[in-house]
Image (tube, rainbow, N blue to C red):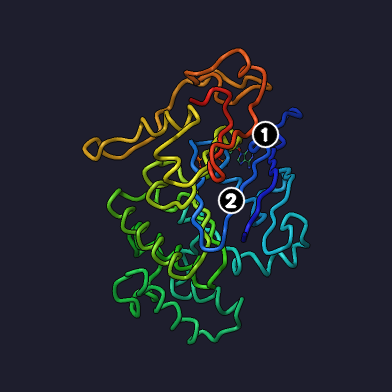
Amino acid sequence: MLLAVEDLKISFRLPEKRRLEALKGVSFFIDKGEIYCMLGESGSGKSVTAKSIIRLLPPQAHVEGRVCFKGSDLLSLPEREMRGIRGKEITIIFQEPMTSLNPTMKIGEQVAEVLMVHEGLSKREALERVVALFRELMIPQPEDRIHAYPHMLSGGMRQRVMIAMALISNPSLVLADEPTTALDVTVQAQILTLMKRLVKGKGTSLFFVTHDFGVASDMADRIGVLYKGVLVEEGTVEEIMSKPSHPYTIDLIKAIPTPKKGKFDIPLLSDEGETGTGCPYFSRCVRRDELCAVEMPQWLHLTPTHRVKCFNVD
Ligand SMILES: Nc1ncnc2c1ncn2[C@@H]1O[C@H](COP(=O)(O)OP(=O)(O)OP(=O)(O)O)[C@@H](O)[C@H]1O
Ligand SMILES: [Mg+2]
């Protein structure tokens, strides 16, 4: 096991002494070479989970729990040691690619800088590695492209540069936060196929965040379904696709379009608000009963790898 996240809780201080609980005690693990997809709608807590793993949340975030990576709890490491891991052993591809590329620096130099900082390579050696990786990512004419500035690239090319930046240090774990959502469907499919091939080829583990069930089912070895800061179901991709068991997961799968209907998006339903102590899906659930309103279900294990938090599983 490469990463074990245990009982992770994230809350934010809001004005007037209010608190927002963004993550309510989430646990999962990722094995070496495994692709774990965290699937959930907007605001469910996917990005805060990814950012908390490498401690990139803003200071107003309060984080509890453990993030065990290669035998250390990252949440309690001194920042100095964390800096040696962040960007080298664990890298992140952010949801907003343009915010993480420097517009005034050539893309080749930006990616090469990772190697110069973490591995002490010369600029020339580093750029050679960048060209080779650009080639693996099927960036055309990589020897020329390294001299381009971010604004000169299409969205799809920029996203490939982001992926290159995340992979160039041969990390053990890549955190990818909706890396292709802004792209059109065919470009998205090409980039995801490449990314999967690359991480599988290198034995890199991938924590992949998405709101798109179709994308998760193409990418994942295992899927965790997150709803309002609670992991409500988890299983192998086959288990989740063939026997989805949480009413939320079932609703998500029903919403996957046939190819003719085009891109899938989770429909935005009315949200009647929190139910306090009960199940977070209560207000939208077709199987709810009185117990669900007041008590949060614990994990029900369906197989050694498939678990669900619901009182009313078929
Ligand atoms: N810096 C912050 N300050 C206050 N609240 C925050 C902050 N960052 C995130 N949150 C809140 O935490 C919750 C989870 O946010 P998060 O960004 O993880 O959602 P997400 O699942 O990534 O959604 P999306 O699909 O829209 O990216 C949301 O309610 C969000 O408003
Ligand atoms: Mg997000």
Percent coordinates x, y for residue 179 in the rendering: 44, 53
> Label 2 near label 1: C-beta < 8 Å?
no
Percent coordinates x, y for residue 53 in the rendering: 64, 54
Q: Secondary structure at mark 2?
A: helix
Percent coordinates x, y for residue 119 in the rendering: 60, 80
Between 280 and 62, the one lying in front of the other is: 280
**Residue 87 picture quarter:** bottom right
> If the image is split into quadrants, where does the N terminus sit?
bottom right
Ligand 1 closer than 8 Å to the CB at disc 1?
Answer: no
Does 200 sit left or right of 90 as displayed?
left
Whole-angstrom CA distance, mark 1 to mark 2, is: 16 Å
Q: Is residue 128 above or below residue 229?
A: below
**Residue 290 picture quarter:** top right
Q: Give the residue type that dot 2 points to.
A: Ala
Please rate how many residues cluster around mark 1, counting C-alpha atoms within 10 Å: few if below 14, some from 14 to 19, many from 20: some
Between 124 and 303, the one lying in front of the other is: 303
Which residue: 64% across, 57% down? 54
Can you tell which mark lies on residue 50? 2
Q: Secondary structure at mark 1?
A: strand
Q: Residue furthest top?
A: 290
Q: Give the residue type that dot 1 points to.
A: Glu
Closer to the chain start, of discs 1 and 2, is: 1
**Residue 117 picture quarter:** bottom right
Q: Is residue 36 above or below residue 120?
A: above
Ligand 1: give its quadrant.
Answer: top right
The residue carrying mark 1 is 21
Percent coordinates x, y for residue 312 in the rendering: 54, 22
Ligand 1 closer than 8 Å to the CB at disc 2?
Answer: yes
